Image (cartoon, rainbow, N blue to C red):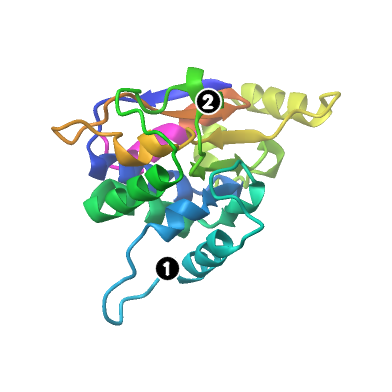
Amino acid sequence: MNGHEWEGLTVDETLRLLRALTVHRYVAGRSHFIHALAFASLSRPAGDAEDVLGAARTWAEATLADPKVDAASRDPALLRRSSDAELLAVVGAFWTDPAARERLAGRLAALRIDIDATRLPFDDAREEDVYPVLVDGGFELFRLAELDPVRHRGAIESFGEEIAWLSARFEEENAVPALEPYLQELPVFGPEELLCAFDDDGRLRAPFVVWTQGEPRYHDYVLRGVERGAKLG
């Protein structure tokens, strides 16, 4: 997979980037999983405000109360398939609400799970060691053969001459074995990514990386659009 990095972003800019990744017109599907400890550590909205995380929080509380589930383990029962809205709400809450970070840190400490504040966030070389994985998200893009000539004209034209587009599509459709899906994967979020991803000036301590699989020209076009949508200049 290929990595695409953004350095020195503020909290607001990084959240805009995440949102832009969820809403562009090339997303065909998504696969997000969020840990019960993350949901259970968030505040309930005040008053009559809509509770985007209501169902997820109820699930998390029941899961953590289940004597058959060890909250300090890697049990997949601790992970819930989640929506784009839930992913954005969870990450945004931890990055903007000190009380949420304090509650999560307290829960982790009670489970004797250490937080290494010196570890740089979003380090792909250490993803296998992230524990617990609190947020794991990614997207599948439409295949080239599925692109609509009107709705997705920009990506098609990004190949340059029509022959380049037709060649790429032909290769996709006739590959044996079939080509793997076009993916855009978020970095793994562990404790450090939710609790200490930003420095004292409010900027990322390390680059935020999106990993892509598939036709590079396609991904480059889509991610340039994501940057524009996030107003990253």
Q: Quadrant of the C terminus?
A: top left
Give the residue type at disc 2.
Asp
Residue 83 shows in this picture: yes
Q: What residue do we see at 30% from left, 29% from top?
A: 117
Judged left or right of residue 67, residue 45 is: left
Residue flagged by tag 1: what amino acid is it? Val
Q: Residue at x 34, y 49 (%)?
A: 106
Q: CA distance from mark 1 to mark 2?
A: 30 Å
Q: Secondary structure at mark 1?
A: loop
Q: Residues within 10 Å of mark 1 (few under 14, many from 20)?
A: some
Taking the spot 60% from the left edge, 47% from the top edge, the residue there is 31
Q: Going from the N terminus, do you reach mark 1 or mark 2 first?
A: 1
Segment tinted magenta in the rendering: 222-233
Q: Residues within 10 Å of mark 2 (few under 14, many from 20)?
A: few
Residue at far right of view: 176
Q: Quadrant of residue 177?
A: top right
Q: Which mark is residue 91?
A: none
Residue 1 position, x and y percent, is 59, 21
Percent position (x, y) of residue 58?
Answer: 50, 70
Q: Specify whether 191 is left or right of 63.
A: left
The answer to whether residue 127 is magenta is no
Q: Which labelled disc corresponds to residue 129?
A: 2
Q: Is residue 89 left or right of residue 171?
A: left
Callout count: 2
Q: Nearer the viewer, residue 91 or 113?
A: 113
Q: Is residue 150 visible?
A: no
| Residue that carries the numbered disc 1 in the rendered image | 52
Residue 229 is a magenta residue: yes
Q: Residue at x 45, y 71 (%)?
A: 54
